[in-house]
Image (spheres, grey):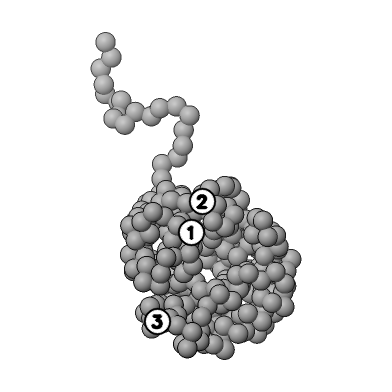
Amino acid sequence: MGSTYELGRKTFTSRLIVGSGKYKSFEETKLATEAGGAEIITVAVRRMNLDASKGESLLDFIDPKKYTILPNSAGCYTVDDAVLTCRLARELLGADMIKLEVIGDEKTLFPDNEKTLEAAKILVADGFTVLPYCIDDPIVCKKLEDAGCAAVMPLAAPIGSGLGIRNPYNIRIILEHASVPVIVDAGVGTASDASVVMELGCTAVLMNSAIAGAADPIKMAGAMKRAVEAGRMAYEAGRIPKKLYATASSPLEGVARV
C-alpha cells in the first residue's frame, strides 16, 4: 500500500491495521485478516485465552511470525490497570509495542486524556513502544508525542459507531503538527470512510467492528484493503483544489466566439 512507514523499530507496508474481536470464529478472524492484507493485528490482552488447556486461542490461527501482534489495554479504566495489562502482555507475548487505551466513560468509551497521558509516560519510561488511543484533540496528541509515544491514534468517532470521520478538520490540524505517524482508530463504518481518512494524509487506519460486524467480513476486509490503497494513492497524487465555480476542462484560448 504505497511507501513504507515505521512504528518503533519495525517497518510496515500495509496501512490497514485490524482488530481481532467480534468475529464468529478464529477461522473467520484469520480469513478476514488475510483478505485485508494487514500486517498488524490488535489483541485485547484481558479477553485473550492464553491457556492451551482451555481450548483454542487466537494465536493458533494468527501466526506471530507472519503478523505483528499488537496487544491493547482495552477494558482498562485506570492508569494502574492499563500499565499492568501492558506489562503482562510483554511478559506473555514478548511484545513491547502496545496500543494504550485508558477509557473514561462506559457509554461512549471515549478515552480519558489525562490518564492516557500519565500511563503513556510510565510505559515509555519502561521501554515500551506506545501507540495511544485518544480523542481527536490536537493538544493531547502533541502532549502524547512529546511524552515519547511512537504514534498518535485519534478516534474518527466512538468505538463501533460506524459514523466515519466526524471531525476531519481536527485530524488535519493533528497531521499538520505531528512528527510521528497519525493512525485514525475507531468509528470507521465502510470503505469510503477509510478512503477519506487516508486522503487526509493519515499514516494508517485501524478498524475492527467495520469488518467483523459486516454481513460478509471477508469481502468487507477486501473492500477496506482497496479503499485504503486508493485513499493513500489519491493523497500522494494530490487532489485538485475545490472551487466555487466551474473551470473548463478544455482550453478556451484560440476558440472562436460567434
Residue 218 visible to the viewer = yes
Where is residue 22? Give x, y as percent.
Answer: 48, 64
Q: CA distance from mark 1 to mark 2?
A: 8 Å
What residue is shown at x 42% (from left), y 59% (from top)? 211
Where is residue 227? Give x, y as percent.
Answer: 37, 54
Q: Indicate the amino acid at tag 1.
A: Ser
Q: Which residue is mark 2?
A: 162
Find the residue positioned furthest to the top: 258
The N terminus: image quadrant: bottom left
Circle 2: is it few (<14), some (14-19), or many (20+) Cα within 10 Å? Answer: some
State left or right for residue 189 relative to residue 147: left
Please tell me which of labels 3 and 1 falls first in the chain: 3
Circle 1: is it few (<14), some (14-19), or many (20+) Cα within 10 Å? Answer: many
Nearest the viewer among 5 and 52 is 52
Please tell me which of labels 1 and 2 falls first in the chain: 2
Q: Indicate the amino acid at tag 3.
A: Asp
Q: CA distance from mark 3 to mark 1?
A: 22 Å
Between circles 2 and 3, the one closer to the viewer is: 3
SS state under label 2: loop
Residue 236 visible to the viewer = no
What residue is shown at x 46% (from left), y 87% (from top)? 52
Q: Which residue is mark 1?
A: 209
Which quadrant of the view contains residue 13? Answer: bottom left
Q: Which residue is mark 3?
A: 60
Which quadrant of the view contains residue 258? Answer: top left
- Say whether marks 1 and 2 touch (CB < 8 Å): yes
Where is residue 162? Give x, y as percent.
Answer: 51, 51
